[in-house]
Image: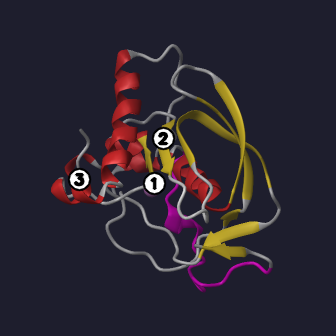
Amino acid sequence: MILMKDIVRDGDPVLRQEAAKVSFPLSEEDQKLADNLMEYLKVSQDPDLCKKYGLRAGVGLAAPQVGASKMMAAVLVPSEEGTKSPFTDVIINPVIISHSVQSGALTEGEGCLSVDKEVPGFVPRHDRITLRYQDTTGETHKVRLKNYPAIVCQHEIDHLHGILFYDHINHDNPYEVDEGTIMFE
Ligand code: NI
């Protein structure tokens, strides 16, 4: 099981690398990695287990964050009081094939299991994306996501390209976003 000690922190070069494409059928190692990434998210979202294992709750975890430079990330966005549309899968070789012109950002900014300090500021993203990825069986999916799950997926896909969320924050004006940016929780 992945614990906080297994999560690579900012400063490790693996977080700044371009991850390698994953081939199918998945190797035993890659299947295990996929299972472990998703397991971490599930356990971390259970308040009792999260506390028991000393985890930080997360909705996404990318393979490079556990030291594996591979194009794979787990996403677990549960439905919450009907305000957030759910999205759960291990996304492999994900590509954003199209996106809205409209930007979106979280009112609370973003955090990352690999970044221990809080970095204040808005992180402008695409509000809506069409995402193509393969699941662990190798099946290709094309999904349209908006708002919160779209932001989570963009954050995770960034990890596969060596990008961290604070790279997107405007350093001169951290709370400045383009006109028309949708802000949501
Ligand atoms: Ni992250």
In the image as oriented, which residue stretches furthest toward the right? 101
From the Cβ of disc 2, is ligand 1 less than 8 Å away?
Answer: no
Residue 18, image x, y percentages: 52, 41
Residue 169, image x, y percentages: 57, 73
Residue 35, image x, y percentages: 37, 31
Give the dominant element type of the magenta stretch: helix, strand or loop. loop
Q: From the viewer's perspective, is the residue at label 3 or at label 2 nearer?
A: 3
Residue 108, image x, y percentages: 52, 77
From the Cβ of disc 3, is ligand 1 less than 8 Å away?
Answer: no
Disc 2 marks which residue?
73
Which residue: 60% across, 84% down? 175
Which residue: 30% across, 60% down? 56
Distance between mark 1 and mark 2 Cα atoms = 11 Å
- Tag 2: amino acid: Ala
Q: Are marks 3 and 2 in contact (CB under 8 Å)?
A: no
Relative to 40, say whether 54 is above or below: below
In the image as oriented, which residue stretches furthest toward the top? 25
Q: Are marks 1 and 2 in contact (CB under 8 Å)?
A: no
In what element is the residue under mark 1?
loop
Relative to 133, say whether 75 is above or below: below
Disc 3 marks which residue?
49
Task: Report the side of 55 relative to 17 (left or right).
Answer: left
Which residue: 40% across, 40% down? 38
Relative to 10, say whether 3 is above or below: above
Quarter holding the C terminus is bottom right
- Tag 1: amino acid: Val
Q: From the viewer's perspective, is the residue at label 1 or at label 2 nearer?
A: 1
Range of magenta residues: 161-179
- Tag 3: amino acid: Leu
